[in-house]
Amino acid sequence: TTLYMIGDATQGGWALENATALAYDADSKTFTWTGDLTVGTEGFKFVVSNTAYVPCFVAASEGQQLVSGEQVALVYRENEEAGAPADYKFKVPEDGNYTVVVTMDGTEASMVVTQNSVAPVPQWYVAGNGNENVPEWVNGKNWNPDGAPMTANGDGTFSYSTTIPAGTYEFKVTNGTWEAEQGSVVYDYNHINATTSTSGYENASGNVKFTISEQADITISLNPEAADNEKITLTSSIPFGQAVITVWTVVGDAALCGSDWDPADANNDMAEDAETPGIWTKTYENFEVNADNAGTVISFKAVANHNYSVGEVPQGEGNNATLTLPEETGIYNITLTLNTGDWTLSNEIVKVGGEEPEPVEPTAEWSFLLNGDNSLTVICTVNALGGQTDPSAVAGLVGWMYVDNPATQLGWVAGSFEIMYTTEVLTDGQTVTLNATWNWQDGGVFTAPETFIYTFNEEEPEPVPAAWYIAGNGDVDAAWVGGLSWDVAGVALADNGDGTYGYETTVPAGTYQFKITNGKWYDPNTTPDGINYGYTNVDAAASNSGYVDGGGNNVMFTIASEATITITLNPAAMDDAKIILASTVGFGEAVVDRWTLAGDVPFFAGSAWGFDAGNDLVETAPGVWTKVYENVEVTSDMAGQTYQYKVGANGGFDVDQYPAQGNNTFTMPAEAGSYNITFTFNAEGERTLGFECVMNEPTSIDEAAAAVITAADGRIYCDKDFIIVNLAGQDVTAANGDLQGTYLVVAGDEVVKVMVD
């Protein structure tokens, strides 16, 4: 006799093989299980085996909310045929630890779910040498004490698992802070279990250091209750050892490299000297120095195996080599040389040509394209060098009508350009003579005559499928337009097969913008064939209301919670009905439930202008948010210094920010000493954001400031981290905002009884 729980409220999710088994007692005919459940998206139900979804036991209604201690009936669902009970799920009121007891007699069953009081699980983190180019390692954060949260395993141990590329990595385990006054706990090399860990790691000034030669699965486990030298276990799917470097690549400014600091760009790979191993070079030939870039300083470095973590010269983020372009304009070869013997990266710049290269006669290539109406398009591609004197271009096609008059070409351009001609409808076997003449300096003439006989195919050529793309502010979220910021051909729309094209994605709350393109931005001079559809092309009747013009004809919309966005393009529709914009939630302002300080103030937690949770403000009264930094040490060097800061909503600036334009200024106290510094933000009405610095009076005892606790309209406010417990001892923090009666507020070591109306 078996019974399993399955669903996104359980740790095993919806996978049958991961279903959670309940223990059966034959005497009482009950199944029992105790563990953690989450609210989830859908909830959970019961299956009688872990190999099939039916038969199963489901809820009587969709999302049936369970009440701790109350008995509910289970509905037996034998199959998925028409007429079978609906596949409804149960939901718990909040994340927590529960005991589930199911009483069953045949297909008759009932259930009692009881929420258990469980002490809060401490949070541990892995801090290490993170790099934004390798976000898989400690979330790309460089020695942030809360870099990568560890997962509680439910048995008092914690773990962090990740898959990372070849490279050298270092780490410690922390409780989220480096500050001793905040109760910092740090485990390092001295706490690693040599018996259970993969061998080959090293001691790097107390950090645990390891090197992998290729991509590997890494797991770091922590048992805080173990002996000091057995607390950390480090395991790897491959042995630790030095990476084998097979290639060095130049990364740097796009003016030199073409790509902007992209270690994956193989066009910038260096070549090792066959006769002198360890000497790697990359030459950028025919680099043009002109009036616009002469004297420019270009930054660059060399990266091993297309990966910053494997090796870089010079070492260190922001530590780069530089070269200065010559002041004299002309054509140059720029050679970069890496010497892995002394780890130097040098450059040599050699002029190979003046501003006026020797004249080279242009060449022309002719190509022919059959159109759907049996007319012929002739394309002449002219290859020419820039800088000729008295340039002109005159061409004529005998008996042909052409679209672009070649005489409008103002001069030869470096590279290639096309002149396109079209004719009237041709007859089968018609002979066409093409002649074109370009004037060349000193009276020289370059002539490209062609005689072409074209016989039509009986079969129509296959039409070339249209390609449409969505471009938008992908820097808001990686799920929006592939995380690409206004890439004109970044994410292709799917061909629906009926002449329409679609794009669908699920994104979190925020403000989003987009346009639809054919892969080119329209410009009347450079790309007149670019097609861009935006706000004026949206079918208002068929789309969700509430979208607006975001400027530049961008379509802009705001969602207050996670939503699935569907965008459909019909290129053949009227101009004001080409785009249909649909959302699973209405468009409107996002609900702000978090305000965070960001700036370059030195005592702010995390990196400058980041959104570290350590800088979150606490709502101490309706619309009033505060953040207190206690015991800030202001040295004589810091006294009077000025910094920039502001607040952002919901972990960023996209939903809301204050000030809306520019930043506020924070000035350190003029007198050195220890201060409590309080920032206060009034988010309602006429907004204000300010600060107050209060010097701590020296005492023989360090006294912590008492928590400020107030209550109004069913909500409790506190200027410190806190939990709310009812008089039965249950944690009801999640219900804050819907409270009524007497509760205990626990803030650090303080416990305060509060009456809520």
Image (cartoon, rainbow, N blue to C red):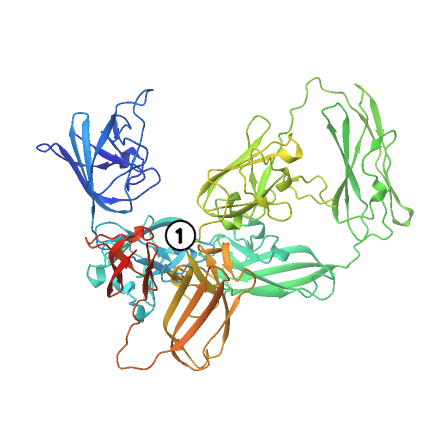
Q: Nearer the viewer, residue 708 or 694?
A: 708
Q: Classify mark 1: helix, strand or loop.
A: loop
Q: Residue furthest top?
A: 458
Q: Residue furthest right?
A: 443
Which amino acid does the dot numbered 1 rest on? Answer: Ser
Relative to 747, does residue 70 appear above or below in the rendering?
above
Relative to 123, does residue 13 appear above or below in the rendering?
above
Q: Is residue 530 rendered to the left or right of residue 318?
A: right
Q: Residue furthest front?
A: 757
Q: Is residue 284 rendered to the left or right of residue 212?
A: right
Would residue 316 be seen by someone viewing this image from the given angle? no
Would residue 124 be seen by someone viewing this image from the given angle? yes
Locate residue 481, reporting x and y percent: 53, 43
Q: Nearer the viewer, residue 733 or 699?
A: 733
Number of disc labels: 1
Locate residue 380, reporting x and y percent: 78, 36
Residue at 8% over, 32% down: 27
Locate residue 521, reporting x and y percent: 66, 44
Residue at 78% over, 23% down: 454
Which residue matches tag 1?
Answer: 213
Relative to 615, does residue 433 appear above or below in the rendering?
above
Relative to 45, does residue 511 appear above or below in the rendering?
below
Corner quadrant of residue 453: top right
Residue at 10% over, 33% down: 28
Locate residue 155, reporting x and y percent: 21, 50
Q: Quadrant of the N terminus?
A: top left
Q: Residues within 10 Å of mark 1 (few under 14, many from 20)?
A: some
Q: Quadrant of the C terminus?
A: bottom left
Q: Is residue 746 rendered to the left or right of residue 167?
A: left
Q: Is residue 704 rendered to the left or right of residue 555?
A: left
